[in-house]
Image (cartoon, grey):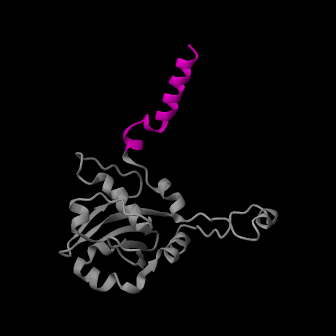
Amino acid sequence: MNCYLSSLGVIDHDNKLHKVSFEQGLNVITGKSSTGKSALIEIFDYCFGSSENTIPEGVISENAKLFFTIFHFKNMYLVLARTLGSNKLFLREADTDITNIHPEELITDFFDQSFFLSSKDFKPELGKYFGLDVTDVATSNEEKMHRGGRNKARPSIRSFTSFMLQHQNLVANKHALFYRFDEKKNENKLLSI
């Protein structure tokens, strides 16, 4: 797997496309509070198969017809999309960056209903693009026998989304990774006095 997040955004009820584009490597998004920075992570998560919609209520969610996330692999683009409140998830390969196509054509042609999958079908299919094809996490046949031959819950593509995106504070604040550790260390210091 060698890919990066190319863009994500929404197509609104007026068929206008609103996107944020990314380059390979570290991308930094800055801006004032309540301008939609954190909503980008929630849009990504929603398109990536989250069972709940955590996109903040407001201008974005009120005007969105379709949310999308696009990955750029070496020879193709992988498009994930979802409409608000839907349990169906869109998954389709494209030869070119679809955000250059007029949004009205995207809605009528590219986002064909036959590419919308149930969550159950979407997650394993998406996992294949990232090399995730685990059917059982048992380490031995004996372990499986103790479970009556049943497979253990297996990881899905949702298991590693947090590694793909890091919240802004992890980059913006060098102490964010060690905040709890430092707090615990100070508590121990106080207890030992």
Dividing the image into 4 quarters, which one contains the C terminus?
Answer: top right
Residue 5, position as x, y percentages in the image = 40, 62
Q: Is residue 190 magenta?
A: yes
The quarter holding residue 14 reads: bottom left
Image-based side of 182 in relation to 172, left or right: right
Residue at 50%, 29% (x, y): give it. Answer: 182
Residue at 51%, 64% (x, y): give it. Answer: 2
Is 41 above or below relative to 81?
above
Q: Nearer the viewer, residue 151 or 115?
A: 151
The quarter holding residue 171 reads: top left
Q: Nearer the viewer, residue 30 or 193?
A: 193
Is 103 above or below relative to 186?
below
Q: Nearer the viewer, residue 115 or 190?
A: 190
Q: Which residues are magenta?
A: 169-193
Residue at 28%, 68% (x, y): give it. Answer: 10
Secondary structure predominantly adopted by residues drawn in magenta? helix
Residue 47, position as x, y percentages in the image = 39, 67
